[in-house]
Image (spheres, helix red, strand yellow):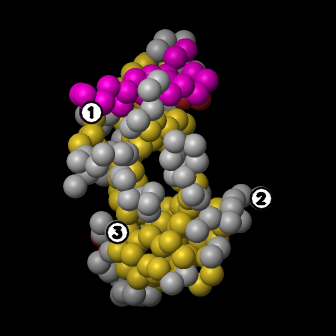
């Protein structure tokens, strides 16, 4: 089984709808992240969390909210979806630094979201 | 603020040849880390290689090596003996000194390996 799972994998929704993307991990990591990927822009950080009591905004948090329900679960919500939120969304986790401090991030498979 | 620049939007390389993907970065952090990820057409993000800013030697992982030039703020990825399966998007990313581990990504380079 995958270490980081995301549901749904694909979603089409209409403008104005509320939608939640879910992420679960079995790696036992404290740190979890949500990124979005747009063509030509790479991945950009939306939110990140160190533990269930710690939520932080990333580079592009407007229009999004998150919930860290447990160490293993981190959900991303679009309260009122708009077409320019159409993107590929990734959840990622990382543990404590290893060796020289790699903080390697482990990514989920991604959720392709289309807002019409 | 940190910034990662990948100036090559796309490139073609012949099978069995080596290819260098450029990455330059800008940061004022005293300690940082540089990553390369591969994204095949299926969409998943695959970690390839990591270089710490204080590492004395360039990182290598199998056919991947990182040409780290700290003074020039560059961290180029070299793929030796390209294979058809290397066709993918490649992202350079950086994390800063803070303990959060969050990454700043470049825009990516699309590599197509031809027979």
Residue drawn 61% across the image and 23% down it: B62
First in sequence: mark 3 or mark 2? 2
Give whichever of A16, A42 is nearer the camera: A42
Question: Is residue B91 visible from the viewing direction of this image?
Answer: no
Give whichever of A86, A77 is nearer the camera: A77
Classify residue B67 as left or right of residue B74: right
Instruction: Decide whether residue B60 is among the magenta residues.
Output: yes
Residue drawn 53% across the image and 67% down it: A32
SS for tag 1? Answer: loop
- Judging by the rendered image, the residue that carries numbered circle 1 is B73
- Judging by the rendered image, the residue that carries numbered circle 3 is A58
Which chain is mark 1 on? B
Res A1 label: 2
The outermost residue toward the right is A1
Question: Magenta segment, which residues?
Answer: B58-81
* Discs 1, 2 touching: Cβ within 8 Å: no
The answer to which image quadrant residue B106 occupies is top left
């Amino acid at each position: 089984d995958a270490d980081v799972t995301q549901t749904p994998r694909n979603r089409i929704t209409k403008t104005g709808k509320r939608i939640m993307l879910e992420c679960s991990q079995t790696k036992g990591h404290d740190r979890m992240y949500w990124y979005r990927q747009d063509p030509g822009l790479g991945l950009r950080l939306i939110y990140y969390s160190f533990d269930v009591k710690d939520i932080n905004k990333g580079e592009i948090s407007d229009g999004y909210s998150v919930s860290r329900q447990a160490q293993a679960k981190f959900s991303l919500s679009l309260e009122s979806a708009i077409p320019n939120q159409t993107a590929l969304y990734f959840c990622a986790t990382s543990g404590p630094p290893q060796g020289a401090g790699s903080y390697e991030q482990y990514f989920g498979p991604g959720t392709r979201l289309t807002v019409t | 603020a940190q910034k990662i620049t990948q100036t090559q939007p796309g490139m073609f390389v012949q099978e069995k040849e080596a290819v260098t993907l450029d990455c330059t970065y800008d940061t004022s952090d005293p300690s940082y880390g540089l990553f390369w990820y591969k994204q095949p057409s299926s969409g998943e993000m695959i970690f390839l290689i990591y270089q710490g800013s204080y590492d004395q030697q360039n990182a290598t992982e199998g056919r991947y090596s990182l040409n780290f030039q700290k003074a020039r703020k560059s961290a180029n990825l070299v793929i030796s003996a390209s294979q058809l399966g290397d066709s993918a998007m490649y992202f350079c990313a950086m994390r800063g000194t803070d303990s959060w581990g969050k990454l700043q990504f470049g825009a990516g380079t699309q590599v197509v390996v031809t027979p």
